[in-house]
Image: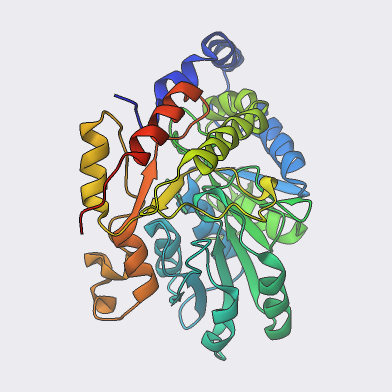
Amino acid sequence: MIPFLDLKQINLRHESEIKSSIDRFLQSGWYILGKEVEQFEQEFAEYCGTRYCLGVANGLDALVLILKGLGISEGDEVIVPSNTYIATILSITASGATPILVEPDLLTYNIDPALIEKYITTKTKAIMVVHLYGLSCDMSPIQEIAQKYNLKVVEDCAQAHGAMYKGKRVGNLSDAAAFSFYPGKNLGALGDGGAITLNDESMYLELKAIRNYGSHKKYENLYKGINSRLDELQAAVLRFKLKHLDEDNQLRRNIAELYNEKIKNESLVKPVFKGLDPETHVWHLYVIRTRNRNHLQRYLNDNNIQTLIHYPIPPHKQEAYKEWNDRGYPISESIHAEILSLPISPVMSIEDAVKVTEVLNEYKEII
Ligand SMILES: *Cc1c(COP(=O)(O)O)cnc(C)c1O
């Protein structure tokens, strides 16, 4: 079987270096908010080009903390893409604000900037964009709209570590950005982890306290905070893995380029490639579309190729958001019905990728 993602191999490639990072942590005898987190925050901020980074417990918390830092709460509206991973939307409802879902562009799968303006009301406080599947959103028109209406911009970078837009990294294209280091992400820890990147000093200082019980100084509490910290152990591992992020993203890009070049089946829609600046995409996922998706998935499985669906149910069709179940988001719905994610990772061999393209080119669609 060609696996969708061999996570074990991704980490075992660097077994001895990861073990020595863990050993350094163990020998330090310091477990929470120590030198590893501090160093990682500096290194990740430098990598993204921002002034500050804060390590937190996971990507969802990073988004929740950002909304808190921006003062967004009940009565406010936040514009967000209708096709995203559920955590993006959960962060907005957790803050008490109302998510305003906006349909994506069918070519990029990212929020369609041309649709945003008509959803802005007097209650709108922010636009939360998601660089879905690893492709940076087209940020210039979004930043222009935000400026025109005095809105904050938040990036969900959980799938796009290292992607660039017009010479800047994602994470540095907004008021604040959230990253996840869930093991399967492009920069993955050995467990949960997350980060916030930002440039504003006062928001940085506030969120730094809020993630730690609202305390800036031991046993003194400025805010009604929470406990959401990146572990020293995970930070030690992430510091090592960050050094390999660009290289890993390039390995993903090589697979994507090969798929793009060699997949020639008319019944499959490939992701945008033409005219794309290669740096804007870090290929967290390589997602194709086809009319009979379940048939294609079975066919690939029968040919020993594992695929996944990101995601099978759009947020507005989830039980958790049953108040939205009757609304129509036709573009999102057709995306969710037709997409399939092909195997891609920094440890996938070129031979396996070629094999995937050969099997796909022999696929005969049945409607
Ligand atoms: C993974 C992911 C998250 C959530 O990150 P966690 O660390 O799992 O909480 C948020 N948004 C998107 C787009 C994601 O892919």
- Look at 42% across and 69% down and name the residue there: 82
Count of residue discs: 0
99 left or right of 297 in image? right
Residue 335 higher or lower than 343, as above or below: below
Where residue 361 sits in the image (x, y, percent)?
A: 37, 40
Question: In the current view of this chain or complex, which residue is farthest to the top?
Answer: 16
- Look at 41% across and 51% down and name the residue there: 288
Question: In the current view of this chain or complex, which residue is farthest to the bottom?
Answer: 122
310 left or right of 71 in image? left
User: Is 25 in front, or is 338?
Assistant: 338
Q: Is residue 229 visible?
A: no
Q: Quadrant of the N terminus?
A: top left
User: Is 99 in front, or is 347?
Assistant: 347
- Look at 45% across and 38% down and name the residue there: 182
Residue 92 higher or lower than 201, as above or below: below
Quadrant location of residue 357? top left
User: Is 245 in front, or is 218?
Assistant: 245
Image coloring type: rainbow
- Look at 34% across and 34% down and name the residue there: 359
Where residue 333 sits in the image (x, y, percent)?
A: 32, 68
Where residue 308 sits in the image (x, y, percent)?
A: 32, 43
93 left or right of 247 in image? left
Q: Quadrant of the C terminus?
A: bottom left
Q: Is residue 302 visible?
A: yes
Quadrant location of residue 324? bottom left
Where residue 302 sits in the image (x, y, percent)?
A: 20, 33
